[in-house]
Image (cartoon, rainbow, N blue to C red):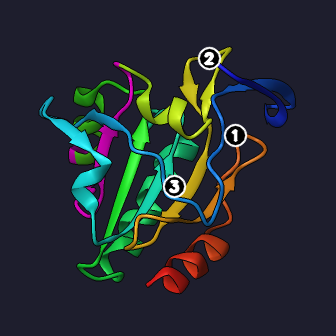
């Protein structure tokens, strides 16, 4: 698998990303994962909708939890044509527990722990940690990647204003 260096750090330490990052303006790569009930999830299920993907290392961390909470609030106002996902390497049970505890109802959680399908397809799998890098991606209704924000420091939150502007532009 292709290795990419120099894109992200964790508390200043450089990390290696595995896979190739898709290009904005090209079709979004397919991926599969697991829902909280262990049923399969496929990106193809979102066909015809604008899709926002929040890639986070673990919902059991403060920054990831804050990102999920923020997008849960934002998702409420984006309408039925927008599907907001949170993808992490967390076990599906942990993702479900997080959503129940935090009152997260507007996001679809997808676990990438089994196959790292998402992380590999989007070049977001961190080699040293086998976690996902923090990123926000927006896929248009036509299945084309419209926006991607790779957060350079894993321990920091994304640029919400830029992500929300990209979501609105994709509508």
In three-dimensional space, the C-alpha distance between marks 1 and 3, rounded to whole angstroms, equals: 11 Å
From which residue to which does the magenta span run? 100-114
Please tell me which residue is depicted at 64% across the width and 62% down the height of the picture.
Answer: 24
- Of residues 36 and 51, the one drawn nearer to the viewer in this rendering: 51
| Relative vertical location of residue 146 with respect to residue 57 in this rendering, above or below | below
Q: CA distance from mark 2 to mark 1?
A: 14 Å
Decide if residue 2 is on the left or right side of residue 76: right
| Residue at image coords 57%, 60% | 26
Residue holding disc 2: 129
Q: Are marks 2 and 3 in contact (CB under 8 Å)?
A: no
Q: Which residue is mark 1?
A: 155
Crowd rating for badge 2 (residues with CA inside 10 Å; few <14, some 14–19, many 20+)? few
Describe residue 125's horizontal placement relative to residue 47 as left or right: right
Residue 103 drawn in magenta: yes
State the image coordinates of residue 157 (x, y, percent, origin top left): 65, 53
Among the 4 quarters of the image, the one containing residue 161? bottom right
Residue beneath disc 3: 67
Spatial distance from mark 2 to mark 3, Cα to Cα?
A: 20 Å
Quick check: 93 above or below 84? above
Instruction: Write down the quadrant of residue 143 in the picture.
Output: bottom left
Q: For residue 11: magenta? A: no
Q: Position of residue 164 (x, y in %)?
A: 55, 76
Out of 58 and 6, give the one closest to the viewer.
6
Classify 38 as above or below 49.
above
């Amino acid at each position: 698998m292709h290795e990419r260096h120099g894109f992200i750090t964790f508390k200043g330490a450089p990390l290696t990303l595995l896979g190739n990052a898709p290009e904005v303006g090209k079709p979004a790569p397919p991926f599969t994962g697991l829902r909280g009930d262990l049923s399969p999830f496929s990106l193809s299920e979102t066909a015809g909708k604008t899709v926002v993907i929040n890639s986070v290392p673990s919902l059991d961390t403060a920054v990831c939890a804050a990102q999920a909470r923020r997008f849960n609030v934002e998702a409420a106002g984006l309408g039925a044509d927008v599907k907001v996902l949170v993808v992490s390497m967390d076990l599906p049970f942990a993702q479900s527990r997080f959503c129940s505890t935090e009152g997260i109802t507007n996001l679809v959680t997808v676990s990438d722990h089994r196959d790292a399908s998402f992380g590999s397809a989007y070049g977001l799998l961190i080699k040293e940690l086998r976690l996902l890098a923090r990123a926000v991606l927006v896929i248009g209704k036509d299945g084309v990647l419209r926006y991607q924000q790779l957060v350079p420091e894993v321990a920091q939150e994304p640029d919400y204003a830029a992500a929300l502007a990209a979501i609105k532009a994709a509508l």
